[in-house]
Amino acid sequence: MQTAGLIVAVAVILAAAAFGVLRRARDGRVRAVSMSSPALEQLGVRPGQVTLVQFSSAFCAPCRTTRVVCAEVARTTPGVTHVEVDAESHLAQVRELGIRRTPTVLIVSPTGEVIRRAEGAPTLAQLRAALSALGRSASAPSV
Amino acid sequence: MLDPRGPRFAAAITTVVLVLVLAFGSGWLVLAQAVVFGVTALWPRYGPYALIYRPLVAPRLSPPTELEPVAPVRFAQLVGFAFATVAAIGYLSGVTTLGIVAAAFALAAAFLNAAFGFCLGCEVYLALARLRAPRT
């Protein structure tokens, strides 16, 4: 037995467990933010509607789930659209908007300002709640 | 497309293996784990742990409710391969500290994947891309 190695193994598992629990609690949580940037227009965000801007990457399994959730929200909520961005091919905008990991979803107001931000995959309920707080509710209960 | 529980199962075995590596300071065991990572990165469906999962574990579970793309699994295996290889070099060449540190990183990723379904590619790939491309 190697005592140093064993201690490291136990410490790593405890630290990783703490990190994992924290992450799970924070993932997908929609936070209020406020920023505007010309990067949004470059990513295809148009004024006049609420836009869900989703950043995805090639090696990201939860990005698929997030795509389905955002598309469903956009389909059922009037005045809300969904734009998915491949983060890797838009690194300048990724830096500009401070995107650290995928999936990250920004909610952009009709005036082109980022007003909410969620890192990690949000649930349908989390996104709907965030949007109805902004006065955008689903037109009909989803199936 | 893969049953996502397969890679989770593999990550659980990997966690146990890496704890044993650290506990016994075994360069050969972590070298074997590096080979497992490498084979799984090349052929995700035929990785050694997938070959245990499919006949022995999958039949006892309900059919998967969703399937996962292969690319994220591959990416995680490649990262695991890199860390396990460095750990093996460290242990086998007598630089034990290097072996411990590299094995510890691999253990953290494997444990997070097994326990929480942590997606390494989501966290790390964009960060690497941001580092690689020069700031304009």
Image (cartoon, rainbow, N blue to C red):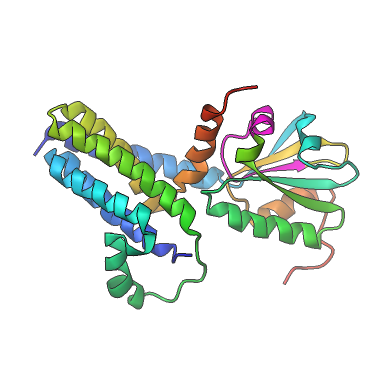
Instruction: Provide residue A92's location: percent of width, then percent of height.
Output: 67, 30
> Which residue is located at x 81 percent, y 42 percent?
A45
Q: Is residue A11 left or right of residue B8?
A: left
Is B52 located above or below residue A80 in the figure?
below
Instruction: Provide residue B67's location: percent of width, then percent of height.
Output: 50, 66
Q: Residue furthest right?
A: A48
Q: Is residue B17 left or right of residue A46?
A: left
Q: Which segment is the magenta one?
A: A91-107
- Position of the C terminus of chain A, as image quadrant, is bottom right
> Which residue is located at x 16 percent, y 46 percent?
B29
In front: B114, or A125? B114
Residue B48: quarter of image:
bottom left
Is B11 located above or below residue A102 in the figure?
below
Q: Is residue B12 left or right of residue A29?
A: left
In front: B25, or A32? B25
Instruction: Provide residue A19's location: percent of width, then percent of height.
Output: 43, 39
